[in-house]
Amino acid sequence: MALGNKTLDDLLGPISEQLGRKDVAVAIKVPEWEFKAQRVTDGLSAAQLVDLFESEAAKIRVQAKRCAKADLAKAIAEIVGAGEPETGEACTVVCADEEAFAEAGLYDALKACDKVTDVHVWDEAVGDANVQKARYATYGVTYAKAGIAESATIVQPTYPKCGRAISLLPLVHIAVVDAATIVPTMLEVMQSYAADEKLPSQVCFISGPSATADIELVRVEGVHGPMYVHYVIVE
Amino acid sequence: MKVAFFPGCMVDMIYPEIGIAAVNVLERLGCDVEMPDDQICCGQGLINSGYRKENATVARMIVDAYETSEYDTIVSLTGSCMNAIVNDYPIVFKDDPVYLERTRKLGERFFEFTDFIVNHLGVTDVGASFHHSVTYHKSCHVTRLLGIVEPPLQLLQAVEGLEYREMEHADRCCGFGGTFSFKQPEIAGEVVYEKCRTIIETGADVICGADVPCLMNIKGALSRMRSDGRLDRDIRVMHIAQILDARE
Amino acid sequence: MSILYNTDKTLRERVSDCLEDDFKHNAIRTAQEVFYVKRGELVEEMGDGWQQLRLHSMEVRNHVTENLDYYVKQFATNAEANGCVMHYAPTGDDALWEVLDIFEKHGATYAVKSKSMMTEEVGLNEVLENAGIKITETDCAENILQTAESKPSHIVVPALHFNRDAIADIYREKRGYTGSSVPEEITHFLRKILRDEFMEAEVGIRGCNFAVASTGSVTLVTNEGNGRMVDSFPKVQIVFVGIDRIIPDLEALDTMLALLPRSAVGAKMTAYFSLDSGPRGAGEVDGPEEVHIILMDNGRHTLANSEFKDMLRCMRCGACLNICPVYRHITGHGYGSIYPGPMGIVLTAGLAGYDQIDTMAFACSLCGACAEHCPVGIPIHDLIRQHRMNIVEQGKNHAVEVPIFKGLELFWSNKPIYLAAMKAGRPVMKAIARGEDALDENSVWIPVVKGWTSTRDFDVLSETRFRTWFKEHKKEQAKNGKGGEQ
């Protein structure tokens, strides 16, 4: 048989045959899973979930801090204001284009920082220039869709105002998480997405800095993605 | 209480003293011990090497010997052999419906030696005294496949004078694995040497277990390490039955 | 077929090589300890939840296996609706052909890859390189292996067999590295050189941990972020998806993700887990413009509805490697398969066939630790034994061993022969042992026996049989009026 150009039927035929049928089942009976696993988050109040999210964040070497909604710009400016995390030198920032950021006056607050030489707000109109900005930026700031308490994971979808590069290319990623969106486990996030008509092109679940232990099992942070991650929990 | 005893072939061939100790312990606990003579080996070395049909020939003899209604309770001295009879024979006899049914019923009457004493007779202190430090190898078949974890430890802890020392990774394989230890001697050697090093590190005078094959393997390795200088003291290798029978 | 490598050597020769390499041997042992402890803590913390999730994962994955054709079709249909270009590969060669075709259509000559076992399985790198295409492995360990032209020794941390000095030397020689042997410095060097490659490459190639049938999504679990880089910047993306990666829906992802990182690396989550549903959307400026999914079978369907169907639940976490007493000593290289360890034996024998695997199916003590630790409850050691039974039934065992096992069958089922052998055996053994109670290393000239005595002493048969003592004992009891019901 010639290679390549195979159809879906070419792939399915042998599978169906192995399963003892001529054609692919048209409809199947999906069992009603009666399933509820015990999780460490069982019975936790909303406030306790935020506490857990924060304590788990520390375990995965994320610096988490809380702030009131009104203080969001100040809280982020405090982090960014320190400049390059290692040298304290001047730095640049790339931010997602979020209404909440604009409302909080974040962009102006960042521009006002002494050590910040450039603040770029993601703009689909400039295309690939966004990626180039992110590539050389010190800080990337995004607004997470949700937080997962069990593993201190943030849920970061991609959309025109928030590209993939912001949470990936800068040396430091600052993720803002609304405390009200912190859920117990990934299950709640998945159930929420399952109810949506269409998924974003990418939903990235981020749990701490990029890391490896490939050389003699020595943990090294900052491999291909950010070396430092901050969560700013807005209450 | 009347019990049928299943010693396993290694006890019959090489280590009768283990069987004798076990019978002593059982009799002291009030058991009337019987043993059919027309049995040799569970044959698991065959199925574990892929020879299922050959194992069936051997297994029929075991089923025939122990199936008699005289024996409600069968005590197996080696957990591994019991696991073969209870869990593997249904595979061995997969194309023999008659023996398949017979072996299923037989399996329900099998008890591992330590489990029998603790959970069936309800005894943990068998009256033994053994003034030595002892470590216990939690063999794969007793611990993992039969799920018997506590009884051997409960029995050991009740022995007068016995000082129990847990070895690191006590529940890891000793590298016996039946014909594996002949077919892959280099690998089996590495695994058992590591087991022996953890035994040696406990500083215990005695290593014991509830599976005779593992003990044979460990004994052989310790003996080799003793003769080539990797071990500088004598460590006794005993079946737990021998400790329970001891007065020393 | 590129599952197997280093096949010029026998399994035994490969094992000997591995046992002689102290650094590799110790590195794998250390890795086992680290993962074992971390995994154990997390499993303990979950209480009953661990077993509940495990059982649920089994139900879900079995359900998919039983309806595999349905779910493959559902996934393919939904992925296509998401805007992915589907390529169907009943065989590995079909997959290679499709990939080459994609490169040709784009005139592309440069690709970056995020670690993917499926691409290893079909030998993709070699084929692309032969076609004049540059392909760079971007996972740190895989990059080390590619640069050093070596093979993985572990499924999760594949370059453990090189120490830091060797790795530094590899990059000094091949990539102009001038730094020290400190892992952090080497890693940050890789960050720098690979970042340029991610931005320049025309094609990104990646695998898929789970494919979601209900949404047509593919997923990727990584720690380093190279998966995200491959997923974000090359304009064309090729995703390898095995037909055994499919789960029904998004909810099942939670179950699988609760099990996978804990089992693989002892973490609640990896740094990154991405759920990808098609190419970049309108108004997005990064992410692939084209996503090509290579949906590949390559022999997997033969496991469905077979003795080995449980293996289709495997999620390649490596938990079985991390507990295996054999893998601990022989490392991935001993097996000579890209799928090593307990799961590797089952899968390699299942996909490559018994003629190809030497004695791999016998490199296992059947201790069952793998099955106990498997997050999706695969009875791995039973499946290894099933392969052995099939090998014997199909006559693919070594002819020389057959008389030995036939002899054991007779010996263990015929009492007169057994007793006669016992009687004759002791003096022979005693003579070989020069009167001692055990055969020592001087007996290695004897076939079969040497298998044992090359590394351990072998106790000689006892003077009397236990059964003889027992009969005497009962006679004695009867004489003394003991025994009977008490």
Image: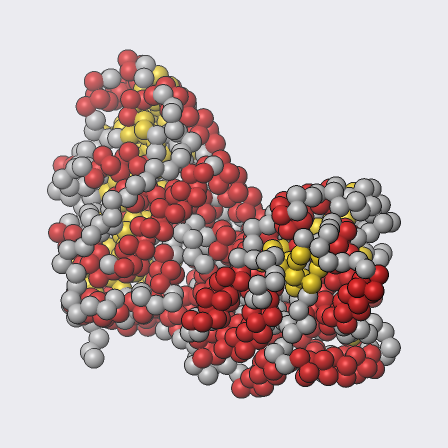
**Above-or-below relation of A132 to C237:** above
Q: Left or right? Give the position of B158 relative to B41.
A: right
Q: Left or right? Give the position of C460 relative to C120.
A: right
Seen at 32% across and 26% down, the residue is A182
Seen at 31% across and 65% down, the residue is C304
Seen at 44% across and 74% down, the residue is B96
Residue C450 seen in the current view: yes
Compare residues C43 and C393 and report the one nearer the observer: C393
Compare residues B24 and C439 and report the one nearer the observer: B24
**Above-or-below relation of A81 to C45:** above
Place of residue C163 in the rendered image (x, y in percent of width and height, measured from the top left): 57, 55
Residue C128 seen in the current view: no
Place of residue C34 in the rendered image (x, y in percent of width and height, measured from the top left): 56, 46
Place of residue C209 in the rendered image (x, y in percent of width and height, measured from the top left): 33, 52
Compare residues C379 and C187 and report the one nearer the observer: C379
The quarter holding residue A103 reads top left
What is the total number of numbered labels drawn onto the structure image? 0
Seen at 48% across and 71% down, the residue is B99
Quadrant in which the N terminus of chain C appears = bottom left
How is the structure coloured here?
secondary structure
The quarter holding residue C311 reads bottom left
Compare residues C79 and C71 and report the one nearer the observer: C71
Q: Left or right? Give the position of C290 relative to C347.
A: left
Place of residue A166 in the rendered image (x, y in percent of width and height, measured from the top left): 29, 36
**Above-or-below relation of B79 to C450:** above
Q: Left or right? Give the position of B17 relative to B153.
A: right
